């Protein structure tokens, strides 16, 4: 599969799926809501989100809307060979806004797509990804130890608020990109992976120690819905929250996974 770029509206009903290719969604007109395995946000014109491959995501167009969508397989020319560093954009879900130079390029890209014989998708995608990478990527983190105990306390005290990586970065008084780099260097996982593990661990505890309804467990642990919790839970543990509740012994035979690729 080569890179594909398309202009399309999103349906005004909530849908969800996952796929084996990466995706970037950028708003052109109107609005859309996205949630990528617990990380939620709104797509407005000139903002976007990164959806890594195999991540369950919920999405809904709000009224009349139009999105520019990049479909990017992991072996696409824009993400392989000399461009392999660009694949780090998909280490974790995130939301972003375009600065003025990228807005100019986006306008060119949209106009190019309307031409009968526009440039190949891989070429257009590689240029955009390179520009986005230079804005979101940071240089290696200087030696600074993050206070993980303080972050853990903040996460547990605010888990129902559907925390974002930006929220955690704010607690450490760092930019989101700088915080993410420091966090990965110190822990070996991304902040998103760490946050998702905290959500799932708390959900598993509530499921095995209370009779709280599943929708309330989802709400208490920062998932947008019971369905979102179930998808993330099944992906992590190979069984559903309902199965765990019927058989609490399942929690004794499995450790919290590293959630590689989350």
Image (spheres, rainbow, N blue to C red):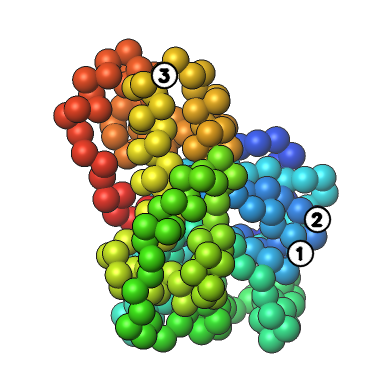
Closer to the chain start, of discs 2 and 3, is: 2
Residue 65 is situated, as x and y percent measured from the top left of the image, at 78, 53
Residue 35 visible (yes or no): no
Which quadrant of the rendered structure holds the N terminus? bottom left
**Mark 1 → mark 3, Cα distance in angstroms:** 43 Å
Residue 107 visible (yes or no): yes
Residue 262 is situated, as x and y percent measured from the top left of the image, at 37, 53
Closer to the chain start, of discs 2 and 1, is: 2
Look at discs 1 and 3 and give the one toward the viewer.
3
**Mark 2 → mark 1, Cα distance in angstroms:** 7 Å
Q: Residues within 10 Å of mark 2 (few under 14, many from 20)?
A: some
Residue in the image at 44% along x and 51% along y: 153
Q: Residues within 10 Å of mark 3 (few under 14, many from 20)?
A: few
Label 2: which secondary element:
strand
Residue in the image at 38% along x and 74% along y: 182
Q: Residue beneath label 1, please?
A: 45
Q: Residue beneath label 2, please?
A: 30
Residue 231 is situated, as x and y percent measured from the top left of the image, at 43, 34
Nearer to me, 243 or 26 = 243
Residue 134 vertical placement versus 250 (above, below):
below
Q: Is residue 208 left or right of residue 44?
A: left
Q: Which mark is residue 210?
A: 3
Q: Which mark is residue 97?
A: none
Query: Would you say the residues marked 2 and 1 are in contact, meaning their CB atoms lie under 8 Å apart?
Result: yes
Label 1: which secondary element:
loop
Closer to the chain start, of discs 1 and 3, is: 1
């Amino acid at each position: 599969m080569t890179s594909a770029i398309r202009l399309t509206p999103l349906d005004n009903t909530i849908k969800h799926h996952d796929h084996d290719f990466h995706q970037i969604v950028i708003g052109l007109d109107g609005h859309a809501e996205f949630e990528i395995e617990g990380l939620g946000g709104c797509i407005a014109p000139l903002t976007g989100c990164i959806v890594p491959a195999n991540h369950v995501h919920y999405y809904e167009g709000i009224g009349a809307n139009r999105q520019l969508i990049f479909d990017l397989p992991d072996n696409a020319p824009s993400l392989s060979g000399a461009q392999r560093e660009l694949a780090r954009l998909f280490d974790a879900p995130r939301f972003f806004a375009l600065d003025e130079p990228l807005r100019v390029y986006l306008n060119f890209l949209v106009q190019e797509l309307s031409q009968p014989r526009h440039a190949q998708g891989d070429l257009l995608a590689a240029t955009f990804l390179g520009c986005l990478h230079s804005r979101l990527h940071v240089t290696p983190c200087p030696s600074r130890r993050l206070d993980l105990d303080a972050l853990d306390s903040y996460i547990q005290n605010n888990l129902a608020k559907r925390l974002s990586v930006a929220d955690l970065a704010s607690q450490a008084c760092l930019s989101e990109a700088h915080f993410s780099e420091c966090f990965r260097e110190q822990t070996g996982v991304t902040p998103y992976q760490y946050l998702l593990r905290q959500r799932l661990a708390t959900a598993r505890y509530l499921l095995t120690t209370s009779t709280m309804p599943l929708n309330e467990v989802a709400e208490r642990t920062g998932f947008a819905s019971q369905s979102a919790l179930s998808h993330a839970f099944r992906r992590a543990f190979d069984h559903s929250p309902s199965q765990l509740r019927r058989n609490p012994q399942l929690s004794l035979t499995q450790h919290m996974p590293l959630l590689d690729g989350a």
